[in-house]
Structure formats: structure tokens, C-alpha cells
Image (cartoon, coloured by chain):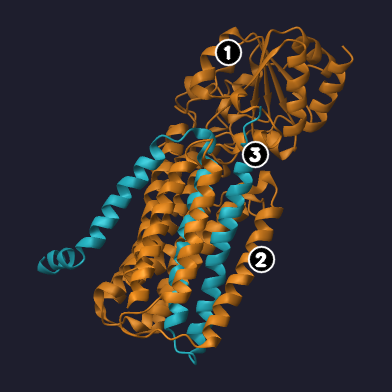
Chain colours: A cyan, B orange
Amino acid sequence: MEQVINFFGENIQMVYVVILSVFVGVELIGKVPTVLHTPLMSGANAIHGVVIIGAIIVMLNSDPDNYLSLGLGFLAVILGTLNVVGGFVVTDRMLEMFKKKK
Amino acid sequence: MIENNILYIIYLVASVTFIMGLKMLGHPETARKGNLVAAGGMLLAILGTIVMYEDPHGNTTRESIKIVLILFAILVGTVSGWIAAKKVKMTSMPEMVSLFNGMGGACAALISLIEFEHNTGQQLSMLTVMAGLIIGSVSFSGSIIAFMKLNGTLNKPVRLPSYNIINLVVMIATVLLGLYIAFSGTTSHALLYLAFALALTYGIMLVIPIGGADMPVVISLLNSFTGVAAAFGGFLYDNPVMLTGGILVGSAGTILTLVMCNAMNRPLSNVIFGAFGESGSGEGVQREGATGSIKDINISDTAVLMNYSKKVIIVPGYGLAVAQAQHIIHELENILEERGVEVKYAVHPVAGRMPGHMNVLLAESNVDYSKLVEMEDINPEFATTDVVLVVGANDVVNPAAKTDPASPIYGMPILEVEDSAHIIVNKRSMNAGYAGIDNELFYNPKTSMLFGDAKAVLTQLVTELKTM
């Protein structure tokens, strides 16, 4: 129990960020019209590609002669980039079609 | 030190762009800009990390070999992601999203595999490593299965006997193993890879029994999984942008999943534990009510009927998209409008394979945004409609959802097309819809069946109308 309380105390900023982000996420989705659900899902999909930051950090922190770590990190960066770039481009293509017509 | 602080400011800006981007994505006028805003924030965060990131333990070095590898990996990912996203057909959009989602999950899992050895013995970090590994892997293998199901490689729900219990056992085993690795301080790579394999297996087993009709919900759920996996990476590195980005998507994705389940009026647990497929296949045999005579109609009679109507409502379904008939249906709409017929589209929330998918497809063929009417708004209008044209839709107009408590789709809100004067259903054959159940609507005395490929039939219909 003490451990848990201490964990909250030491990481209180993060806990705040998590809880507030949860509420922001919920609020953002609440009022979206059905027509935009697919692009929204796709846009959100691109945003979780932020995991690529972690992959870059892995590579920056690894030993230059630790080939396993570098290799896996390399693969992770490729996958993360695919998620980010593919996600944003697909979303843009979907939204391109919603252009208002006169 | 100053660099690190600049990086934190960049992360803050990026987090704000994610929130703004998601917000703007919720409104038709700002959606496209919102996507670009979020993409801009992402670019900033990535560049900032490459140039300025410093590990608090001083592990970070920037040998040129590492930087070259990073940039090369980004180049490879960018080029292939860009090409894939540009080339994909609008009808294949859902599986593309699923595939990209899987890539994110795999990325999170790989990070955890590498970070394992740097964090042995630290229970809390290890807990986040294992959580990232398990959630990322489930999301990865699940997304790949969803991808294969949607593109038709895997088209039958596979259900082992008592798979719910087996799935539950695999899930519990995965979680327990993850907890054991985190808290025992073990350094065994064998256990790590066992957890990895178990999580991948669970992802496969989670998605494989689920039928095509539920795939949108599954993709949305896996999307939020990947978000959570990214957030665990944020915990691990104390990285605020990964944390906010991941949690935002995690919570937004969960809400989106629930919104979709709501549209189908099915609790999420039904989707996951599959009350759908089981009762669907089991009860199809005993349904005798849905028999009777079917009335055919030919092209010219359809053309006459529509030409002299005041109001026509088109109900597009996934069959329309499969037949690539979204352009020709817009042409049909134009011709009818020229003749003074009021034309609207009734879009069911789960028409197509993702919510809003049908809207994307119709928007692609320049159908006016204001003609796409959502279910709640169009249902009262059917009573004043002369002809309803159902193209490639089935379950979303099945009256069994209202009348037959034994039906697997009972309770799902449907488009109440039977209130209108005439119903014309275009289908390729009498095959059942995605949910695999019969549709009484086809036997309704007001219903006429117009068999044939949607594109071919609509093309002939347009030609016929032009001669009138």
C-alpha cells in the first residue's frame, strides 16, 4: 500500500497528465458527427504513431556495437514511421473528399 | 541542459497540436486542417527528439552510424507508407487503417523487447515494459488478422469449440506471465519471448472468431490499444508527448468504439465474446417466418417508377462500394433531380465497414454533403417517400431487428424503409448479408427485387432514364 501511495506522490505530474488527457479524449469524441468517424479513427491512428519517438530514443541510447538492439530499433523506427506517415496521408485523402461544394 | 528544455517545449507544442488536431477532425470544415496540424506537431516532435534528446542517465550518444540508421529507417517508412496510403482504393480504406495500426503496435512491442534488459530488477519500469509488450503485440497480431479478414484472405469466422474459455485462459496466462516477469526481477529472455508469443497468439484468437460486420468495432478497439501501448512507452521514458498522444488516442478510441457499439445497439462484450455469430448460424435454420414469394422487377419498370416519383431515398450499403457503383449512383441522383425528383441518401451509422465509411465513398464521387442524411433524421421521412432504392445493403434494413427477439441483430436500430410506398432492393443474389441472416424485407409485398451487379444495374437504369 505504501508503495502505491509513494508511486503516486513521486509521479504526480504524470498521473495528472494521464487523467486530464483521458477527459480531453472523451470530450473530443463526444460531439463528432457520424460522417467523420472514419477519418477521425484514421487520424487518431496516425497520432498514436507517436510511439516512434520511443523507437528513436531506443536507437539513440543503444550501444553503437549492440547490433541486436540497433537492428530491432531500426525496424521499430520503420514501423513507427509507416504508422505516422501512412496514417496522416490516408486521413488526408479521406478528408480531401469532404471539400465543400458551391 | 538547455537543449533538453527546448525539447520539452517542443513536446508541449506537439501535445497541443494533437489535441487541437483531434478537435478539428470533429468538424467537417476544419477536419482536413486538423489532420495537418497534428501531422506538423508530430514532425516537430520527431525532429526535436533526433536532434536534442538526452537521456537522464547520460546514455545518449550521437554516433553518425546511429543517426544515419535512424534517418534511413524514417526514409524507408515514409516512402512505403506514403505510397501505400496514396495507392489504396477508397473501398479498402478500413483494412489500410488496420494495417497501419498494426505497425504502431509492433513498434511498441519491439521497443519493449529491447528495453527489457535495461530495466531488469526495477519493478515499476519492468511493469511498463511488459504492458507495452503485451498490449502492443495483441494490437499488432489482432490488426493483421482484421486486415486479412477485411481484404478477404480470411473470410470465415473461425470458432473453436468453447473458444471463449480458451481465449480467457490465454489472456490470463499472458497477464500473469507479464506480472511475474515484472515482479520477480527475472532476466530470462526465454520467459520474455514466451510472453511475446502468448500475446501475439491472444491477439489472433481475439479477432479470428469475430465476423466481418463487427470488424469496425474491432479496429477501433485495437486502435485504442495501440494508443495505450504508446502511452506505456511514455511512462517508461518519462516522455510527455508519447504519454499525452497515447492516452488521448486510448480514451478517444475507446469512446469511438462505444459509439459504434451504440449504433449497432450491441454491448461491446457481445462483440468480443461473440453472441453474434453463434446465434446467427445456429438459428438461421429454424427461421421459417422469412419465406414467401419474392417479386422481381426489371430495369424499365424501375426507371418508370422512379421517374414519376416525387421523392426517392437511396440506401447505400457495402455492396455498392464493392461494385464500385458510387459514381454511377451519383449520376442516377443527378438525372432524377433534373426531373424534379427529390433524392436523398439514408446513411446508417454502420453502413459500409467503418462508421462513416459510406460517407467517405459517396463524397469521393462528389455527392453533396447535405444529401447524406443520418438515420435518426431520415427515418420519419420514409412515410412520405415514394421509392426507396436499397443498393447492396441488407442487415441495416432488416425488420427482424425490430420484430424478432430471437434474431441476432434484434435491437439494432435500422432504417425503417418499409414505411415507404415502394421498396426496390438491388442485390447480386439472395445470399444473406454480412451477419449471415435472412431478411424478411425481401418478402414484403411492397418490395421488388432488382437482381444484378450494382454497377451494371445502375448503369442500365441511368441509360433507361435518359431515354424517357
Spot occupied by residue A31 in the image (x, y as percentages of width and height): 41, 34
Query: Marks 3 and 1, how far apart in space?
Result: 28 Å
Tell if the residue under mark 2 belongs to the same chain as the one under mark 1.
yes
**Quadrant assignment, res B79:** bottom right
Q: Residue at x 78, y 15 (%)?
A: B302
- Relative vertical location of residue B263 with respect to residue A19 in this rendering, above or below: above
Query: Which callout, 2 or 1, points to the residue nearer the camera?
Result: 2
Q: Label 2 to label 1, Cα distance in Å?
A: 48 Å
Q: Is residue B38 above or below residue B442?
A: below
Q: Nearer the viewer, residue B286 or B159?
A: B159
**Residue B94 location (% of width, % of height):** 59, 48
Residue pointed to by mark 3: A97
As shown in the figure, which amino acid type bears the numbered disc 3?
Met
- From this viewpoint, is residue A31 visible? yes
Q: Earlier in the sequence, mark 2 or mark 1?
A: 2
What x and y, as percent, mark residue A99? 63, 36
The amino acid type found where label 1 is placed reads Phe
Expressed as whole percent of the image width and height from the top left, the position of residue B88 reads 69, 52
Count neighbours of disc 1 (C-alpha within 10 A) and say few if under 14, some if 14 to 19, many if 20 or more: many
Q: Which residue is mark 2?
A: B79
Label 2: state its secondary structure: helix
Pointer 1 residue:
B382
Pick the front one: A85 or B354:
A85
Relative to B437, B229 lies left or right: left
